[in-house]
Image (tube, grey):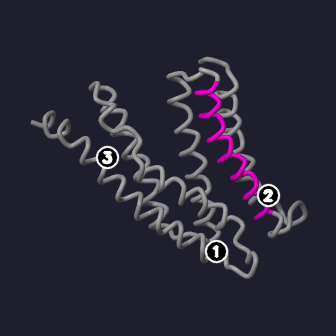
Amino acid sequence: MPLNIPNLLTWARILLIPLFVGVFYAGPNWLLPSEQNVAATSIFIIAAVTDWFDGWLARKLGQTSAFGAFLDPVADKLMVAAALLILIQMERADAVIAFIIIGREIAISALREWMAKIGAAKNIAVSFIGKVKTTAQMIAIPLLLYSDDLFGLSMLRLGNWLLLIAAVLTLWSMVYYLRKAWPEISLRSK
């Protein structure tokens, strides 16, 4: 494992997950509910920014590595899954939508692993629709974590709309990746 700044940022993102979850399990003597919302939103945003920054930094410094390419999406998926599970528990997100998002991540990760194993990983490189899905998701989650009204707008309502859009894009991108992989799947299933 190369020890460099981008990989350290990825590890930091993983280490933020227990802190993020712990914010909601802190008693009211430690944090009021509104303070929990702000703290969790802040932690999630910091994690999202480090996700972008570690990739940019790895490319800028020429410190990309196979380990970093593996660890970065794992950190992202863990943080998103933790956030969605917390949001379900707090009744701010629908379990079916969270299942679609988490289930797709597991399925596409397995597909990518299989495609890499057979030497066809380039066939399912990250798509534009996948990036749009991630953007919608990474905006929706902080809005749902914050959940209070802001500037007269319901962050909860806006966050749920964006999460629904992310779920639709999630399904769309999954179909896209499966279609790209289908020639290999059909060739090897005979």
In which quadrant will I find the C terminus? top left
* Percent coordinates x, y for residue 186 in the rendering: 14, 40
**Which residue is at a point 56% across and 27% down the rendered structure image?**
68
Residue 48 percent coordinates (x, y): 65, 48
Residue at the (56%, 23%) spot, across then down? 64
Q: Mark 3: which amino acid? A: Tyr
Examine the structure image and report whether residue 186 is included in the region drawn in magenta: no
Tags 1 and 2 in contact by the CB under 8 Å rule?
A: no
Mark before the other along the chain sequence, 2 or 3: 2
Q: Provide the residue designation for mark 2.
A: 39
Queried whether the magenta region covers residue 41, the answer comes back as: yes
The image shows residue 99 at horizontal and vertical percentages of 45, 60
What separation in Å lies between label 1 and label 2 (alpha carbons)? 16 Å
Q: Is residue 48 above or below residue 40?
A: above
Q: Which residue is mark 3?
A: 177
Q: Amino acid at mark 2?
A: Ala
Q: Which residue is mark 1?
A: 156
| Residue at the extreme front | 60
Q: Are marks 3 and 1 in contact (CB under 8 Å)?
A: no
Q: Nearer the viewer, residue 12 or 153?
A: 153
Task: Give the mark nearer the N terminus: 1 vs 2.
Answer: 2
Residue 6 percent coordinates (x, y) = 65, 28
